[in-house]
Each structure stands twice: as structure tokens, then as C-alpha cells.
Amino acid sequence: MCDLTQRVYRVFSTAPIRPDQQDLYVDLDEVRGQADVVRRLDRRIRLADQPTCQVLAGHKGSGKSTELFRLKRELESGDSPFFVVYFDVTQEVDANDVDFPDVLIALVRQLAVQLDEQQKIKLKPGYFKDRIQRLGDLLTREIDFESFDLQTALGSVSGKIRSSPDARFEIRKLLEPDTSNLLYAANDVIGEAIIELRKKGFSGLVVVVDDLDKMAVRLHDDAGCRTDEYLFVNRAAQLTAFKCHVVYTMPLSLVYSHHEQNIAALYGGDVPVVAMTKVRKQPPSHAAFEPGVRRFRQIIDARLTAADASFEEVFDSAETCKKLILLSGGQPTELMTLVREAIVTHDLPIDNESVERARIEGRREYARLLREDHWPIIEKIRSTGRYTRTRETEQTFRELLDSRAILQYVNDEEWYGLNPLVADIESPASGSIRSRTSPKSKKSKRISRTQRKR
């Protein structure tokens, strides 16, 4: 494999930009059409005289994790720095089945691990020692209760919760009746951590629980509501009860549900949303929005510089690059995915045929996904960029948001656009699929997109 191809492929990673990769960061706030979400989260924490609990929402792939890394960096800087525990909750729990006890165990474990690794602070187990002893045979890893270590013991519990549905059920059954005492124990540990951190010059403690928005959203087995509603609304009293500043990511569709006002009241005000970058004008125009296109071109250029690659080596023309940007719909992660897919299917330089192959295969995926009851909403958004949900259509609307068939934008005022891969599809009553492919691309082999990350 050509070294250039490998370098370019690797630099267009879909992983969030880490604090040590700021050369890859491009500020998108101006073309997202909103105030800096990082500043809003940061100010609420710094101005508060009590622990805060906030949520951040946005489409999958909109750049939430990158913004949360920025928040971490901001909070850790200045004259009054905070100690920030950031973690990806999907590494601790099963995203297909999440409940509050899982989140609590993950939060306390990550707090213990990161305090030990970064500040050499060892937290005392307190009540957790007794509780974990009572889990007994459910834990396959042998735990030395004479020299009990909090992070190791909670790691054993967290591993079981993530990997074994049967053990997860049994652990929850034992922990759930004791939730208030678990919270008391967690806050006892948190209080101890804050005391030790202040001795080292920190203003306080912030825990950032990322990727909770990636939880599987379905009807809850017992609660009679969706799983995201159960966790963030029904269990809000527990999620907001930690005695330190906490930030969770939340599924976007829940923010745009009839729970909207309730969520704002529960989590400290209007929910900051990492909106999509505007690369097309609001329907019915659909024309390219050049400021947004230029910002995405800056993202591409920054990655090419990091890969020590010229634009001409990677793209056959500026027009091909622009087509790929427009196909992303203003989704940063989707932009990375499209570049990688083009490289896998057609090597370098990326040309019009590569982009058209990506369009065709992505369009087929959505054509299989969409149902008849989705189309009235899709057609309304196609023609106006607006939609007013009703109780009858809310569930369908939220499904379309979750799947990113429709994308949310905030520019001057809130509006919606169709995912470009959906924009090519007409409702069953109108025909099948609009063809925007060139004659050359129609003759191309069908390339599988099964590796494409969504």
C-alpha cells in the first residue's frame, strides 16, 4: 500500500480531536449559527455556588466529543482550574441497555482511576466495600477484601455490567433497592476527592460523561416509555444528585420532544446543542452555503497538512472536494467517513466517480430504512425546512432525527434539512429514486458500504 494513501486514510479518523491535536481543530460556531456551547457550559460551572448538572445534545457525528475536549481544556486552565474527569461511558456500560446504577458505578470508577493516575490520590472505598462483598458470586474476578482497592473492585462490577446481560440483571436487582445509599456513598467519595483536590490547588471537580447519547433508544421493557425518557426524565433525580459538577451527553431527539421544558428545568436551563454545519441554504433553496463549505474545506486542508499531503494528491479537482463536502450534510464525522470510504473503494486521488459511489450506496441504505409514515415529514422538510411536531407524529419525527435522515440546523433560527443521502429519494407515491449520477458512475460496480461507520 502506498505510504501516502495510508497517511491520508489515518489522518481522516472519525475519532474526536484530542487536546493534543489542536492543529486539526477548526472553529465551526459561525457556520453552526449559535453561541459557543463550550463557553456556555464553562460559564455555568464557574459562576455557580452549588454543583451543576448539565446536558449537551447534538446529532451523532456533529462534533460533541471534540467540543467536550475543548471544555475540559478550558476548565483545566486559568487561575482557578478544575480537575476534569472525562470518559466515554460506552467503554463502561452496554449502550444497548443502560440504567442509572451502571452510570453511577462507571462514574465513581473513572473518578478513582483518574485521580490515582493523574494526582496520586487514592480514594477510600467506604460503603462500596460492603456492597461489592454482597455481590459475591456474580463477580468472576477474585477481589481481596483485606486490601480492598476501589478502582479494581468497581472495574470488576463494571466489566460484568457491560459484558453479561444475566449478571447485569442480577447486579441491578441487588443495587436498585439501595440506590439512595449508593448515591450517599458516591457523594462521600466525591466529597473526599474534592477535599484532596483543593489541597492541590484545584477549584473543584467536574465529571464529563460522554457518549451517553449513543444509548439504544427503544421502548423500555417495564417503564412504558422510551429508554432515553426513562433515564434522563424518570431518573433525573438520581442523575442530578452527584455533589460535583456533571455534564452528560443526551440524545438529540429527546431535546425535541414534549419533554423539552421539563428537561430544561431539570438540567439547569436551555440545553446547548451542537448543531450541524450549514453547507446548504435552508429549503426550498438547497443551494450551497459557501461560508460553510469553506469551513469544511479548512477541515480537509488541516488534515492534509497533518498527513504531509497536497490537495492535488488527494482530490482530482476542487469541484470533487465540494461535492463530497455537500454530501456530508455538514456532519464533521460523516466528512471523515466519506473521505475514508472513497479511499477504500477507489484509492487516490478521490474523483467524481468515488463520490457518486458513496452517494449511491448510502442512498440505498436509507431507502431500506424509511417507512411510509416517514414520508409526510420528509416531504414537508424538503419543501420548507420546517416541521411542527404533534403528539401523533412525535415518535416518527424523533426516529428520523435519531437516524439522521433529517438534520437539525441553527442559523438565525432553527430549521431542518434532509440528509443528502435521503434528498435523492422520492416518496413511494412519486416514483423511486432520483438519479443524480453521471453515465460513467452508473456503469461502476456496486461497492459495499458495510464498513461505513454511522
Image: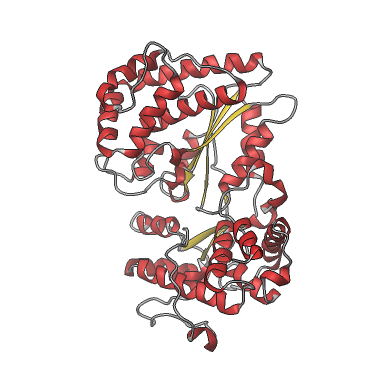
Measuring from the top left, give residue 14's x and y in whole percent: 56, 54
Tag count: 0
Q: Is residue 370 visible?
A: no
Front-lying residue, 158 or 366: 158
Could you say which quadrant of the image residue 306 lies in? bottom right
Question: In the picture shown, does residue 257 fall above or below 189?
Answer: below
Measuring from the top left, give residue 297's x and y in whole percent: 69, 64
Residue sitting at 58 percent across and 50 percent down?
A: 63
Residue sitting at 64 percent across and 38 percent down?
A: 71
Residue sitting at 51 percent across and 19 percent down?
A: 190
Give the residue at the far front of this rendering. 1
On the rendered structure, is 136 left or right of 320?
left
Measuring from the top left, give residue 286's x and y in whole percent: 59, 72
On the rendered structure, is 82 left or right of 135?
right
Question: In the picture shown, does residue 359 fall above or below 156?
Answer: below
Measuring from the top left, give residue 37's x and y in whole percent: 63, 43
**Which quadrant is the N terminus positioned in?**
bottom right
Could you say which quadrant of the image residue 137 lies in? top left
Q: How is the image coloured?
A: secondary structure
Q: Is residue 394 visible?
A: yes
Residue sitting at 62 percent across and 40 percent down?
A: 69
Give the residue at the far bottom of this rendering. 439
Could you say which quadrant of the image residue 403 lies in? bottom left
Front-lying residue, 344 or 259: 344
